[in-house]
Image (cartoon, grey):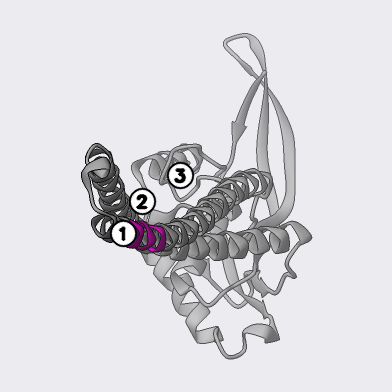
Amino acid sequence: MGSIAIAQFQQVRIGEISSKYKDSLSQKQLHDLIQEIKVQFERQLGYSVFEYSPSGLPINILFANESQRKKLLRRYKEDLTSTQNQIEQLDKHIADERGLFDKDTQTLKEVSDRLNRSIADLNSYIAKTNSTVSSLSKEQYQTLKQNIDAQQSNLKKEKKVFEQMRAGHNRDIREFNRMISRHNSLTRQYNSLVIRIESLSDSILEVKGKTIGKNITTVKTYTQDGKQIVQKENYSDMEKIEIYGFDGNMNQLKAVLAHEIGHLVGVNHIKNKGALMNPLLQSNQIEKMTLTPDDMKAFNQVFGAVRQK
């Protein structure tokens, strides 16, 4: 038993245009798009597959409410943008703070080194003078002691200042580490949102349009070369085209409409990337609607038997 698909030349007309689009889509604009698609198909295929007629099948431009998953996806994308902005701001703040932090670290090291040298110098001086204490007069000893006490007092003050600087630096380190921790948390949040968006996007088949009708199968039986042949013929009894969620992008509307007209005349989906009849709306078709070689092959396959009759 053989089975063949039969294409069908169709007539179309403008049906309902939702009042939601009264300011963004007129009947004339839609009529012009249909004519542009007709001319494009004829120029590339070399034959006509549809025409505009007041008695044709209706093309309805309808308004569809957002699904809950779409709303969730939009919220995730908004959260992703917000998180990315926070990360970028924190990146700048961390870079600025790192510069100040490195400068303070260097200053603290210089102060520490200078203080340690002063302590070492004083200890060395005390060690040297201890060997001469017995030979000093009382007045000389008192002068030496006052000198050492003054140096020790100054060192004590310098050490206190150093401890204050180090305490402030340690507070800066803790604050800097908190910023790094916040940055890491935001990065994890960002990566989690990316995974959620990818997963949710994969689960949503965003239907921009639909061709509505029913498939009909007829069976023919005939004899050829003494053998009985049973052949199925599949064709579609189409009713209308519905386009959903028009967002004002005329190029996108043109691509979606051309895709659905392809279905209307009997062309099925093809998996080839970039093709008009790919089940997913292709970005290149939005930029410029055109039939790819794979599209033309699909049209020629279903229209070939009709055109040979």
Asked whether the residues under the numbered discs 3 and 2 touch, taking CB atoms below 8 Å apart as contact, a structural biologist would say yes
Give the image location of residue 221, x and y in percent. 71, 24
Kindly report the distance in space between the C-alpha atoms of the residues bearing marks 1 and 2.
114 Å
Give the image location of residue 128, x and y in percent. 22, 39
Q: Nearer the viewer, mark 1 or mark 2?
A: 1
**Residue to which mark 2 is pinned:** 45
Relative depth, front residue between 210 and 303 = 210
> Which dot marks residue 263?
none
At 26% from the left and 52% from the top, the residue drawn is 114
Q: Residues within 10 Å of mark 2 (few under 14, many from 20)?
A: some
At 60% from the left and 55% from the top, the residue drawn is 264
Mark sitting earlier along the chain (1/2): 2
Relative depth, front residue between 132 and 169 = 132
The reply to whether residue 272 is visible in this rendering is yes
Q: Amino acid at mark 1?
A: Gln
The reply to whether residue 41 is visible in this rendering is no
**Residue to which mark 3 is pinned:** 299
Image-based side of 307 in relation to 45, left or right: right
**In this rendering, is residue 272 above or below 43?**
above
Asked whether the residues under the numbered discs 1 and 3 touch, taking CB atoms below 8 Å apart as contact, a structural biologist would say no
Element carrying mark 2 = helix
Q: Would you say the magenta stretch is mainly helix, strand or loop?
A: helix
Kindly report the distance in space between the C-alpha atoms of the residues bearing marks 3 and 2.
8 Å
Q: Residues within 10 Å of mark 1 (few under 14, many from 20)?
A: few
At 71% from the left and 57% from the top, the residue drawn is 212
**Residue to which mark 1 is pinned:** 142
Element carrying mark 3 = helix
Residue 108 sits in quarter: bottom left
Magenta-highlighted residues = 147-157
